[in-house]
Amino acid sequence: MNILLVEDDYTSRSNLKKFLSKLGHHVVDCANGQEALNLFGPEEFHMVLSDINMPKMTGMELLQEISSMPEARDVDVVLFTGQGNMDSVIKALRLGAYDYLIKPINVNELAIIVERVAERRALIKQNRALSEKFEENVRAATEETLSELSRLKMVFARAVGLETFNVYSDTMKAIYERAIKYHSDRLIPILIQGETGTGKELIAKIIHYGKFDKAEPFIDINCATLSSSTFESELFGYEGGAFTGGLPGGKKGKFDLASGGTLFLDEIGEMTVDLQAKLLRVIQEKEFYRMGGLKKIKSDVRIICATNADIEKKVKEGTFRQDLYYRLSVGRFVLPPLRERKEEIVPFAQTFLRSFARKRGKQFMKITNQAAKILISYNWPGNVRELKNVMDSVTFLHDDNVLRPEHLEILRCIQRNELATENLRPFIDPECFSLPAEGLDLSLFINRIIDQALKINGGNKTKTAQFLGITRRSLQYRLEGK
């Protein structure tokens, strides 16, 4: 699609343009509404993505101008704004905006909206071709539509992290084949158990997307990042006047957004018992009430849950409902840690090594036998995610045609730090702070610290945030940006 991006903040505009371009779209950007209007005519746009609050001409005014232009009658306008401008958002939707986003923009939500706009435009194009009653035009337009939709689905899947699923062991092959089978039956709830970094969300997406034959919504919610007071409204939505501070017109919840698709509940073990009862009722009855609502709403949603907690222990302790556990266990996956799949370590390392080397223009292609032995002997507490991070770090710090033992000094640093943690004493190893001459990727090492802190705190994000001295929102922001 041809997308017109209107944003007065240069950094935000540049980042959004790069992301949309990676999705395969042609993006023209400008800094204000007047510049945007001047671009219509010389170019044809299918979608306009605009900030609401801008100098000279607001996004609202731009929307009104576009709505009155004959040459822009099929353009879909998506506005974005800060949390404090919800009244403007409601007004924009009434004026004909296709959708809206809240700053800071979540790229997964943006990708979903762009996907829907592209699918809508493809269907409009197909319908127009049909109305002309020319069989050759219909056939050509249909083939083009299907081809474009297929391409967009694949690009979108990569954008949200669902790349080619590499299977290097019989265990993971069996799990992959089961996930594909469950894709065809949306009525079966799924529970995915496994340590942090084993790929629980990836399996959830394979169950949802199958072999990319559908592009229904995949909506995720982390049960550990929301308080019990806000979780119910996020999950089920609320009617206007349900509570003080809510939107006058109410708000749809995650169940509404996931209609026809999948709702992925990560860290389900952190959900309160009372909400567990309501979730169980939705699973069984296929309907729910919004907060403050009197009307039952039908639910057409696949439920996939994931946890790194010992759910069986929580059931015995009474902190997780036994009936919900049994209901979710109908489709239960247990992902073994990487240390129990040692045959996968070197193939995964090779894949990540080559990928990051291409990204950074480095020469790495192979792994020496000595380096392979070091990789296999390491325990990998952070599983595949940790292995990926290590290969990222190696290709940043070094360049060679093969991975050698000296390139894996980072593993020895990690092991020393883990030993210090087990001894419950502060530990800083000066050898781990040698800096490369070309500069330092600070984000990479911050992510490494966060991974270690999550491991220390058993994957609990609230405790991890307290451990690091930051807010849970800040921690979640860092995790989403990894």
Image: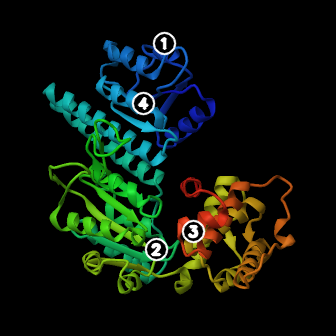
**Contact flag, marks 4 and 3 (Cβ < 8 Å):** no
Q: CA distance from mark 1 to mark 3?
A: 52 Å
Is the residue marked by circle 1 packed among few (<14), some (14-19), or many (20+) residues within 10 Å? few
Residue identified by numbered label 3: 463
Q: Which mark is residue 204?
A: none
Q: CA distance from mark 4 to mark 2?
A: 41 Å
Q: Position of residue 182 (x, y in %)?
A: 27, 70
Q: Position of residue 149 (x, y in %)?
A: 33, 44
Residue identified by numbered label 1: 38
Q: Is 115 drawn above or below residue 402 in the view shown?
A: above
Disc 1 versus disc 3: nearer the observer: 3
Residue identified by numbered label 4: 79
Q: Earlier in the sequence, mark 2 or mark 1?
A: 1
Task: Identify the element where label 2 is drawn.
Answer: loop
Disc 2 versus disc 1: nearer the observer: 1
Q: Which mark is residue 167?
A: 2
The residue type indicated by label 3 comes to Lys
Residue at 75% across, 74% down = 408
Disc 2 versus disc 3: nearer the observer: 3
Residue at 43% across, 73% down = 307
The residue type indicated by label 4 comes to Leu
Residue at 17% across, 61% down = 286
**Contact flag, marks 4 and 2 (Cβ < 8 Å):** no
Quadrant including the N terminus: top left
The residue type indicated by label 2 comes to Val
Specify the quadrant of the image occupied by residue 124.
top left
- In the displayed structure image, the side of residue 1 where residue 430 appears, left or right: right
Q: CA distance from mark 2 to mark 3?
A: 34 Å
Is the residue marked by circle 2 packed among few (<14), some (14-19), or many (20+) residues within 10 Å? some
Using the image as rendered, state which of residue 208 and residue 168 is in the foreground: 208
Q: Earlier in the sequence, mark 4 or mark 2?
A: 4
Q: Position of residue 30 (x, y in %)?
A: 55, 23
